[in-house]
Image (cartoon, grey):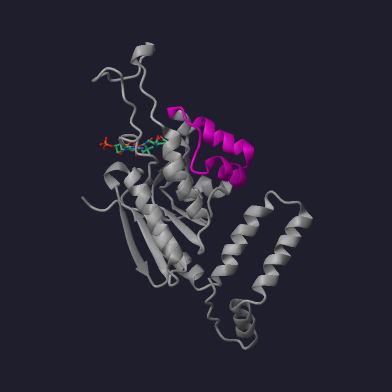
Amino acid sequence: EDSPLLISTEGAVRVLTLNRPQALNAFTTGLLGQLRVALDEAAHDGAVRAVLITGAGRAFCAGQDLSDPHIKPEFDEPGDPAPSADVHKKPKAKDIGNLLDHYYIPLALRLRSMPVPTVCAVNGVAAGAGANFALGCDLVLAGQSASFIQAFSKIGLVPDCGGTWLLTRLVGRARALQLALLGDKLPAAEAQAWGLIARCVADAELQSEAMATAQKLARMPTRALVQTREALDAAMDLEFEDALRLEARLQSQLGYAHDYLEGAAAFLTKRPPTFKDR
Ligand code: T3D
């Protein structure tokens, strides 16, 4: 069988492609594990200066693979097709918390703390954890036919993979509740209008636009970009003065780094800069 994750490199951009198109790239423990290792490798490879994540086929990712043996409910009586009100026929609870502890939480933390910028090219539907994994990337581009679904409520779960944190910050409480309670499909154009994602682009241009964005980020001062992400996230929970002090602390470190000296010198001498800090 093909690998559930394709890994390639274009210049300084590491490209990760979810590759289970027959199941809309739904996350199995195998895919989740490979994704985390691939992000680790990109984080530790000094030649990588941006990561681009996308999906193969018509979907980006349908979230947790509900047929994965780690999650599929078991029934007391073999062959019982559906859970019943009868307590003796209830499905045995699978330990979903365990799946989150071992796979989703480490993956979401890894993504959020990448030492390089991350771009997501959402090429089709992104549902459940697939949507929130995409939204965890720094810049999210989506094709016009793509959509976002907080599918959790429909199967009796709460948003995970950072969804509660991300949605409230990205679109505010009212829209976060609308998405999370109803679980309806939000088309990419609306997702852009809501501020859930950075850009909705024509399907035919998605991959080239996302790659151009990742290549542009890869040429920029990586350390400053990553500290910008950290400062923006921290600012949501800081008093104004504390945000000013955090900015000053980061600036005083960056001010001594190679990239600032290079950036300022290149500007003053009217030549293109070459950044290298990570
Ligand atoms: O353990 C835990 O659950 C904890 C972790 C939770 C995190 C989560 O992500 S929970 C949310 C899980 N995801 C979903 O509930 C979404 C389920 N999928 C859908 O609602 C729909 O498939 C879509 C709206 C995403 C797309 O609809 P559509 O009509 O374009 O495609 P389809 O026909 O429904 O799906 C195509 C195939 O993919 C189909 O297989 P088949 O019939 O051709 O053999 C379908 O079963 C399969 N597929 C889609 N999503 C999943 C899946 N198989 C396994 N798991 C899926 N999540």
Which of the pair 222/94 is nearer the observer?
Answer: 94
The range drawn in magenta is: 155-182
Residue drawn where x is 42% and y is 47% of the image: 146
Residue drawn where x is 48% and y is 33% of the image: 183
Quadrant of the image where one finds ligand 1: top left
Residue furthest left in the image: 1
Residue 232 coordinates in the image, percent (x, y): 64, 56
* Most common SS among magenta residues: helix
Q: Is residue 250 visible?
A: yes
Residue 239 painted magenta: no
Residue 170 painted magenta: yes
Residue 202 coordinates in the image, percent (x, y): 42, 56
Q: Is 184 placed above or below 118 here?
A: above
Which of the pair 39/57 is nearer the observer?
Answer: 39
Residue furthest bottom in the image: 269
Which of the pair 50/254 is nearer the observer?
Answer: 254
Q: Is residue 209 visible?
A: no
Residue 97 position by quadrant: top left
Whether residue 266 sits left or right of residue 154 in the image: it is: right
Residue 58 coordinates in the image, percent (x, y): 33, 48
